[in-house]
Structure formats: C-alpha cells, structure tokens
Amino acid sequence: MAQTSIALPKIKEPSNLKNWLGVSPFFLFAIMFILFPSLYLVEGSFFNQEGQFTLQNYVELLQTPSIVNAYKLSIQISAATAIGGGIFGFLLAYSITVGGLPRQLRSALITFSGVASNFAGVPLAFAFIATLGRRGFVTLLLKDNLNIDLYQAGFDLYTFWGLTAIYMFFQFPLMVLVMVPALDGLKREWREAAENLGATYFQYWTRVAMPILLPSILGSMILLFGNAFGAYATAYALTGGRLGIITIQIGAQIRGDVLHNPGLGYAMAMGMVIIMAISLVGYSWLQKVSERWLR
Amino acid sequence: MASKGLRKVVAMSDTSFDVSVGQGAPGKKRWSLLRIGGRFWSWVWFILGAIYFLVPLFATLRHSLRMERDVLGFKAYERAFEDPSFLETFLLSNALAVATIICSAILIVPTAYWIRLRLPQARRIAEFITLLPFVIPAIILVFGLIRTYSTHFTIPFTDIELFQPLTTTKFGTYALITAGYMVLAMPYMYRSVDTGMRVVDIRTLTEAAQSLGAGWFTIITQVILPNVRSALLSGALLTFAIVVGEVTLASFLGVDAFGPYLFLIGQHKAYEPAALSFVTFLLTWIAMGMIQFVTGGQGQATGAH
C-alpha cells in the first residue's frame, strides 16, 4: 500500500515544515480527541484518591473478583463468537467465492453482510428478544411444533449463550466481508498446478490453500474478537446492565463510581485498551504475513 | 453478462486442463466429484447463513405488526411515529450525522490529499492514528472524553488550563459528541477517501490545475473533491449508519439522540420498539445498498458496535 506513493518522484518541496503544517489540523484533532482522553485515563489509573502516584489500582484490579470475572466473561464471549463466527463466516465466504454458487447470491450476501455487520446495538437486541426471548418467535415455534422448550433446556437469552447468539449476527457477516477478498486472492494457477501434479482436492486445500489463507483467517478472527470485546450497546440494551461483561462494568463506573474508587475504574479501562492493543498488534502482524501471498 | 463471461473462462480452463493432463489422470475424477459435493455444502452454508440473517428480521417484523389483537397491522408504526420525541431525537441524530460527515470530510480530504502529494513520510503515522479507534472502543472513548472535557481542560500531567468544561453548554456537548463520532468514523472515512485517491492520479491533476493558475482551495474543492466523490460518499453513508443508531456516546454525554430514545421506549413499550428496530434495519440497508451502488461493489466496510 505504502510503496506506490513513495516510489513516485518527489515534487520540489517548498519546505518540510510547511508540508507538516498542511496536516496539522488532522494531528491536532487526533491529539485533542484521541490522545488527550487516553492520557487522562492513563493518568487517572496511576493516582489514588488522595492524588498520589500509585500502582495500587492495578493491584486491586487483579484482586477484585467481580472485575476479573467480568474480563473473563468478556473474553469468553468474544473468543466464542470470534471462533464460531470466524468458522461460519469463512464457510459462507467460501461458498460464494470458490464454492460455485451463482454470482447473484454473492452480491446479495455481501450487501446483506454489510447491513448485518452494522446492525447492532439496541435494535439488534430487540430483534433477538422478538426471536429467542421467552415469548420469541423461534422459542414458541420450537415449543408448539417440536415440543422443544429452549428455556427448559437451559437456554436463556440474557446469559452467556444468548449474548453469544446475538453477537454472532454481526460477527459472521464481518468475517464474510474480510474473507471474500482473501479467497478471491487465491490464484487459479495454484489450484491448476496442484491438480496437474496429481494432488487430491483435499491435499490442495490442506497443503496449498489453507497455509496461504491461515494467517488471514486467524487475523480476521482476532478482528472479530476485538469487535465483540468492545461492544457495549447490544449487551446493555439486552440486559439493562445485569450481565457482568467488562464494558457494562465500565459503563456502571462512568455513571456513578460504583467501585468507590475512580482510579480503579480508569485501571479497568486501561486493561481493556491493553487487550485491544494486543489483538490489534496480532492482527496487523498476521495481515502482513498474509499479504505475502494474497494481495 | 459478467457471470456468463466468467463461466466461459472457467469452462475454457477446464478443457485446457483436459488437454494438458490427458485421460486417466488419477486426481481428476475425485476433484470434480468433490467439487459437486462442495457445491452441495456451499448451498447448505448459504441457506444456514440466510436463515440466521432473515429469521430475526422476520420475527421483529411479525412482532411489530401484532399490536392489535388477532389482526396484522401497522398500528405500532403509527404509534411510534406519532410520538413527538421520536421525531425530535431522530432529527437530532440525523443532524449529528450530517455534522460528523461534513466535519470529517473537511478534516480528512485535505489531509489524505496532502499526505499522498507531499508528505508520504506521514503516511504510517496517519494510518496508525486511523487504527486507534479500534483499540479504543466507544465506551473507553466516552470515558476519556468525559474525564477530559467535563472539567476545566488542562494539558495532561500539568495544571495548564486551556478552556472551560464543554459539557456544561448544549452547544459544547453537541460539539463534543460530534468530535467523538468523528473519531469513531475516522477509520472508515480515512481509508475510503485514501483508497479513492489512489485510483485517481492526484499528482497530475494537481499539476494541471496549478499550471492553469488554481490555488490550493480551488484545487481541493473543484478538482480533488469531485474525483473522490464516490469514495467520500461511501464513507459518509457508513458514518451515517454508525451515527444514527449510536447509543454509547449519546447516553453517557446526555444527548437526547435516537439511540438512547430507542433504548428508553424498549424499557416501557412492547410493540413500538420492534417497529422502530425494523425501520432502523431498513435505513441501514438503504445506506449499505447505496454504498454498493456508488462504489460498484468495492466499498464494503463495517462500523463499530
């Protein structure tokens, strides 16, 4: 991406400083509304209520069971929907690219994926209450026709599995959107070469296609993980703040210092930023690896 | 047309394959068999995906039509639209979306242009900045914004005061939430505009305009902007889809936008929320459909939750 513009011959520059001045509004905006707010959270996490520098907030963070459990639950839900949504999204992307489905279905699915991956928050929660809630359409359908009572069987929309089912609605479409270009990048020559050398279709997939796609698949799953990990509105609309995932805990802390220690709240936020940053680094690295073959 | 052409290419490559390998190639039969099997599974995945997409929407629609006993009707929609708060909050959200889009365009188009033209060394850092909103989810962003701008604004780690709290005035709050939305939309806007600039030769365009005596303002508004129109529009539509239903920033900053309103009626009413959810879905669909239309299927991206 970057090479194209660097390779161009440089126009004679009036002065370097003047060039940087041209982008200063953008950087100023980023400093004001991304950097400063983040720094304020960092700053807050390192001070106690008396205004002294301390690491106590982070120690307390790891020792408060409710917070540790919130992180755990968030990570579990995000990982489950990233893996589940990733696999299902990949299979869907496969079916509309190399899977041999008619082209019209491909554009229909891509448009729909764009819609679904952006259809989140309150309306999504309501849609699933109407579907899988206690009096939801599917719940009643299964109960009346097949005599399967989901809620008797232990399912509850307002718990881990319910939220996982809801998140899947925007997770696997996102996977479709990021995997379709990667699958399109599989060159016909590779398949033909494998075929001509006598490989079976299975061998082609395990020895050629999968190794090429794997970094891209894993990277996309990390993207999905981050996508679910940072989600707040859907879970809040669904449970009104009862399900203890980390974003809801942070929300409660913003509304009214439920932890009775602002510093701990900031440390909690920083913990989230750190997890998100780690996943972004992993994503960028895998993206770079996959670009070796897929452009 | 395109699909026919493609099928022809596929057919041609299959015959050439026959020639090159000849009869009795061991792998061949298995490949074609598996491909038919593959197509069967493709259909299975596709249908499962379609069910997952469509059933919740159908359930929402069905629920929204059942406000009156034993008849299907649009009563819930009537009731929802009648509420004056609906119109108020919905218009406010639209106004915020438009403000976000305009401010983002003013900020991002010249920046992306300048970086491509004169400052390629700033490219990496600009890309890094546009990735930051992925690391800082909305809930963290609003946390930071509240801590930074609801008190007297000082430079972090110092006591140097720059300005008064923003959240005490209505205009200040709107400005703050617009800035927050600009941050949320930045990855999509920047990437979309930057990709748009890659396909047009901005260097030649700039030189041509300069040799005709155009100034920078004219170049950006009259030459560059029209050339990245469709990229900008697709970024704008995505921003619209993100902002109109946004809840997190709006509820924590205390802005009476459509998202918090929808949440509120969800607590008190049974059928209207389903109706408005379905309307929101249609709006998202329209925005995404228009993106497909203006970019010719190249501009898919996705927003924050």
Image (spheres, coloured by chain):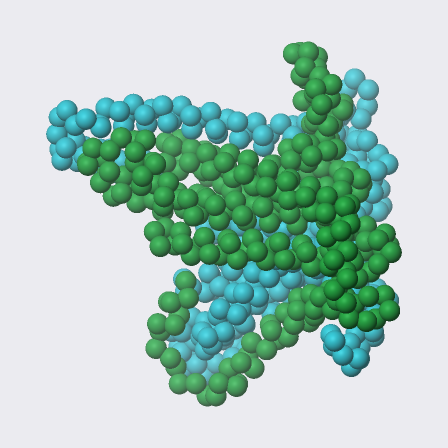
Chain colours: A green, B cyan
Q: Position of residue A37 (x, y in %)?
A: 71, 66
Is residue A56 at least partly visible in the picture? yes
Q: Nearer the viewer, residue B35 or B140?
A: B140
Q: Which quarter of the figure has residue B7?
A: top left
Q: Is residue A291 left or right of residue B17?
A: right
Q: Residue at x 13, y 35 (%)?
A: B20
Q: Residue at x 36, y 46 (%)?
A: A212
Q: Please, is residue A175 above or below residue B215 in the view?
A: above
Q: Please, is residue A217 above or below residue A84 in the view?
A: below
Is residue A140 at least partly visible in the picture? no
Q: Is residue A124 left or right of residue B285?
A: right
Q: Position of residue A86 (x, y in %)?
A: 52, 39
Q: Residue at x 87, y 56 (%)?
A: A260
Q: Residue at x 24, y 33 (%)?
A: A199
Q: Is residue B261 left or right of residue B96?
A: right
Q: Nearer the viewer, residue B239 or A168?
A: A168
